[in-house]
């Protein structure tokens, strides 16, 4: 039987141990309901676990030891180093993946994500389809975690909605985007003429540190954006622009741009607009509350988180980009 989706959990529960099958208890019942809400019949999915047995203590704490006993090549689990004697369980799971060849692996919980993705921080990486050595993986919360914290249910439901779409093809598909960085004045003018001027809407993001704007991002379409920097720590005085006259010219351009009759969209954009006005005397015209993605999301899902990373995991199909940052952020708080 062809299984488009393989669902991987952590280990057997007490009910699973009695039935010698995964997801047969309360967690399985909840998973069945959530999948059904999204048009997925759990009978069409291949169900398994990282460890197909019930740990002696009921948790993975009983499987850990010191680093010398750890399974080679695997990162540390949140409970500790998983002992090498349990490596055959992981070999069994690898074999199942090779046999089933699913279009999508739904990794439920930190343990499944720890093994399949190499990162068990489920709250950080859930909701994104990820390329792995085992194929396309979509991490989300384990239904057992949802039973303990029921506010997680809508998140699991939305992630399963993404799984319903992603099960139709095995590859990770992302939009190709073009980001123009380190522009000169002529680059800014060319970008405006080619992309901003013809567009009836623009998405704006302001990055700040203290009371200073470090850069402004302008996106007139879903696949094209320009980043205008003002702060550069590698340059004398920290200014990206070579002299005051050059920087003033850019600020005047932005003032003219935001005065044009064009819709402005942004995440927590009321903060950005207020910052531009109070700190730089630049009013933003064409802005209405309905163009603030944070407010619109809050109107739709008032019980959920409102940060940009969370919205990206729900509404987009990007990688968890904030985990790619290697240096301290200069980003304003967007929650």
Image (cartoon, rainbow, N blue to C red):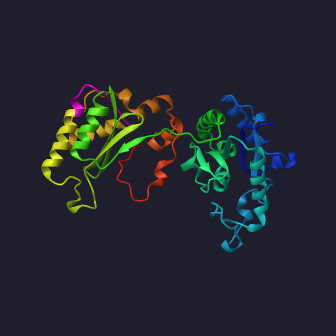
Q: Specify the quadrant of the image occupied by residue 128.
A: top right
Which one is in front, 285 or 245? Answer: 245
Residue at (58, 53) in percent of width and height? 121
Q: Position of residue 29 (x, y in %)?
A: 75, 37
Residue drawn at x 38%, y 27% as measured from the top left: 290
**Residue at the image point whose x is 43% and y is 59% from the top:** 326
Residue 329 percent across, percent down from the top left: 38, 54
- Asked whether 258 falls inside the magenta stretch, the response is yes
In screen coordinates, is 64 left or right of 181? right
> Is residue 279 located in the magenta-colored stretch of the structure?
no
Q: Quadrant of the N terminus?
A: top right
Report the span colored magenta. Answer: 257-267
Q: Position of residue 157 (x, y in %)?
A: 62, 35
Question: Which residue is at a point 34% across and 28% down the rendered structure image?
Answer: 201
Q: Quadrant of residue 216?
A: top left
Q: Is residue 250 above or below residue 42?
A: below
Determine whether 117 is above or below 263 in the image. Answer: below
Would you identify the image quadrant in which residue 172 lies?
Answer: top right
Q: Residue furthest left?
A: 245
């Amino acid at each position: 039987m062809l299984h488009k989706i393989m669902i991987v959990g952590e280990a057997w529960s007490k009910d699973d141990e009695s039935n010698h099958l995964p997801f047969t208890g309360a967690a399985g019942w909840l998973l069945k309901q959530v999948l059904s809400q999204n048009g997925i019949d759990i009978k069409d999915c291949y169900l398994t676990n990282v460890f197909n047995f019930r740990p002696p203590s009921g948790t993975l704490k009983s499987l850990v030891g010191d680093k010398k006993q750890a399974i080679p090549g695997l990162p540390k689990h949140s409970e500790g180093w998983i002992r090498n004697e349990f490596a055959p369980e992981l070999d069994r799971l690898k074999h199942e993946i090779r046999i089933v060849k699913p279009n999508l692996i739904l990794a439920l919980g930190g343990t499944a994500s720890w093994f399949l993705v190499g990162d068990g921080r489920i709250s950080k990486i859930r909701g994104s389809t990820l390329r792995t050595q085992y194929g396309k993986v979509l991490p989300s919360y384990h239904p057992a975690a949802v039973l303990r914290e029921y506010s997680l249910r809508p998140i699991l439901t939305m992630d399963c909605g993404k799984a319903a779409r992603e099960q139709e093809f095995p590859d990770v598909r992302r939009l190709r985007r073009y980001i123009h960085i380190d522009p000169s004045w002529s680059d800014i003018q060319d970008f405006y003429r080619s992309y901003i001027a013809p567009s009836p809407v623009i998405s704006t993001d302001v990055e700040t540190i203290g009371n200073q704007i470090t850069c402004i991002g302008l996106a007139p379409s879903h696949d094209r954006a320009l980043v205008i920097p003002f702060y550069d720590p590698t340059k004398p005085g920290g200014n990206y622009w070579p002299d005051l006259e050059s920087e003033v010219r850019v600020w005047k351009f932005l003032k003219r741009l935001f005065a044009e009759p064009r819709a402005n969209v942004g995440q927590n954009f009321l903060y950005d607009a207020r910052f531009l006005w109070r700190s730089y005397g630049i009013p933003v015209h064409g802005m209405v509350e309905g163009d603030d993605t944070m407010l619109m999301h809050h109107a739709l899902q008032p019980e959920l988180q409102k940060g940009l990373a969370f919205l990206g995991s729900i509404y987009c199909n990007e990688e968890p980009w904030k985990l790619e940052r290697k240096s301290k952020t200069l980003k304003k708080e967007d929650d």
